[in-house]
Image: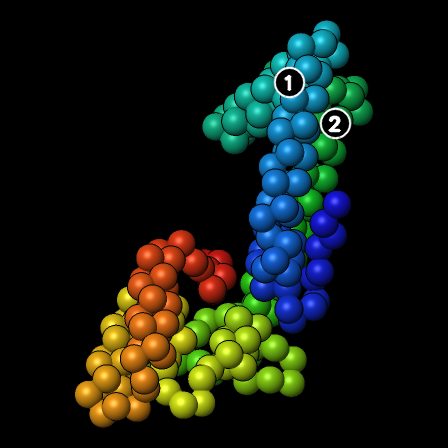
Amino acid sequence: MIFPRNGDPRATVEINGYFYYPEDAEEARREHDARAEYIQKIRDQWLQTKHGQLCKELHEKFHEYKAELEKHPYAQRRPDGGALDSDYPEHTLFAQALDQMSLHLRERAECDRQNLAKAREAARCTHLHTNGDQCRSPRMKGRKLCYMHARMKEAQAVKLDLPPLEDANSIQVAIMKLQKAVIDGTLDHKQIGYLSNLIQIAAWNVSRTNFEREEVE
């Protein structure tokens, strides 16, 4: 079983609100999908029971009554115009449930707002893509780069200043730099062959990679 690593700067892959190491992402995603499938199966089985059907019917009628009250405010009063009181326990129960649900929704919305604000305020990676756009991923603690771009920086060659092969633009720049190295004689034929193959692999793989987490609107 793969455990989430929330709070660890190396955990850059988000799955259903939990963060995992990139190397664990595929297995974690399978576990989440299997768990979701199991929960849905249990839910479907429960809905086939008598109590499940009654609960579903109650839920539907609850929202039907709520819509009626919103559409016709006088439905909250007695036929003679008086206020509904403890003599109508069904309505009292509904009102209490509605208040609790409204409170829960407000608290959840506030929590989501605070989490989103924190995410937007987090320091971002200073890496600039080839087109000049800045990386949007949160930077590692005490570092200027995110986890992925820090690893790319560590893997950068000293002899030939190639950009990280992370998109079509950077691959095109790498091809141009390889062309320059061929003309200037910076690399030997074997190195040129190896590097050409690597760039071809990067060009094939670039559409299958996603180094950044999307911003939540």
| Amino acid type shown at disc 1 | Asp
**What residue is shown at x 59% (from left), y 60% (from top)?**
22
Rendered location of residue 124, percent (x, y):
51, 77
> The residue tagged with tag 2: helix, strand or loop?
helix
Rendered location of residue 123, percent (x, y):
55, 79
Q: Which residue matches tag 2?
A: 92
What number of labels is visible? 2
Q: Nearer the viewer, residue 212 or 197?
A: 197
Quadrant where the N terminus is found in the figure: top right
Rendered location of residue 141, percent (x, y):
65, 80
- Rounded to the nearest whole Å, what is the CA distance between mark 1 and mark 2? 31 Å
Q: Which residue matches tag 1?
A: 44
Rendered location of residue 155, percent (x, y):
51, 79
Quadrant where the C terminus is found in the figure: bottom left
| Amino acid type shown at disc 2 | Thr
**Do we see residue 124 in this rendering?**
no
Q: Nearer the viewer, residue 156 or 146?
A: 156
Q: How is the image coloured?
A: rainbow
**What residue is shown at x 46% (from left), y 82% (from top)?**
156
In the image, taking residue 10 as reference, residue 155 lies left or right, namely left
**What residue is shown at x 44% (from left), y 89% (from top)?**
158
> The residue tagged with tag 1: helix, strand or loop?
helix
Can you tell which of label 1 and label 2 is closer to the viewer? 1
Give the quadrant of residue 173. Answer: bottom left
In the displayed structure, would residue 178 be above or below residue 117? below
**What residue is shown at x 67% (from left), y 35% (from top)?**
35
Pick whichever of labels 1 and 2 is earlier in the sequence: 1
Q: Residues within 10 Å of mark 2 (few under 14, many from 20)?
A: some
